[in-house]
Amino acid sequence: MPTILDSIIAAKRREVQLAAAATPLQTLERRLADAPAARDFFAALAASPGIALIAEVKKASPSKGVIREEFHPAEIAQTYQARGAACVSVLTDREFFQGSLADLEAVRAAVKLPVLRKDFIIDPYQVVEARASGADAVLLIAECLDNARLKSLHDTISGLGMTPLVELYDPANLPCVLDLGARLIGVNNRNLHTFEVDLGHTLRLRRLIPSDRAVVGESGIRTRQDVERLEAAGVTAMLVGETLVREPDIGAAVDRLLGR
């Protein structure tokens, strides 16, 4: 039986085909000259005192449905910036997360922080889309790609001046992620096949990742205690969305997470 991830990837293939038919790659590439210069995502994380926060703009998810009814991406991102986030992540998948590239463009114009395109990236077309829309970084998910395609997309992202954030869940994918030279490695605490979450997953994998690589803990980070556990384990940054977006006062939720 197909998993949630299988369904998402099948839908993503259809989405990319339709997008490329409507706007050919060559047309999209011509837009790159007008894109704003990429901001240094990696440097922003490194400059953060303590564990850095990548705060996510996210309306919905397959497991929780709509997380925030009153959803204004630019305003949310401005709150994140004002409360000390190092970077902003924008969920751009439409079918399963109710996001869009328009959300990313609105956020990029509203803040000075580097912005990550978070989506299920399977094709170079989406990388060019991201840069043309102003993205400074792009998420790659090892579980969605074979080794050759992961390497190719990683290099394409870097070649366009953006930062690749290479995410994995399965420890079996770690050697490939390390071999391709990823400097920024995300560990997803959520099994994308079952959507079950275990915060300890990042803690266990951190011990297997060389100290010269920056590690981002993703998913299931809800409390200040969770943050302290990650920081004590040497995790560089945390990517947090639902915990913040679902709260009536997003700014106060950021403060609680950062211990303020």
Image (cartoon, helix red, strand yellow):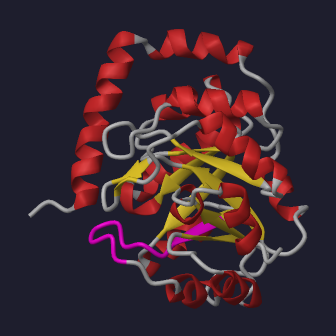
Q: Is residue 24 left or right of residue 192?
A: right
Please say whether residue 139 is visible from this viewpoint.
yes
> Residue extending furthest left?
1
Question: Would residue 135 be seen by someone viewing this image from the given angle?
Answer: no
Quarter occupied by residue 190? bottom left
On the image, the x and y values in percent for residue 145 come to 39, 54
Residue 212: x percent and y percent? 79, 75
Magenta span of residues:
185-196
Residue 252 is a magenta residue? no
Give the residue displayed 42% in from the left and 12% down from the top.
Answer: 23
Closest to the observer, 58 or 12: 58
Pick the quarter of the image with the N terminus.
Answer: bottom left
* Front in this rendered view, residue 185 or 80: 80
53 left or right, relative to 126 = right
Total labels: the figure holds 0
Q: Position of residue 126 (x, y in %)?
A: 48, 33
Q: Residue at x 57, y 76 (%)?
A: 222
Does 192 appear in magenta? yes
**Quarter placement of the C terminus:** bottom right
Q: Is residue 85 above or below residue 168?
A: above
Residue depicted at x 81% and y 39%: 39
Q: Residue at x 28, y 68 (%)?
A: 193
Quarter of the figure with residue 183: bottom right
**Looking at the picture, does residue 194 appear above or below residue 67?**
below
Q: Main secondary structure of the magenta part?
A: loop
Dividing the picture into quadrants, the one containing residue 211 is bottom right
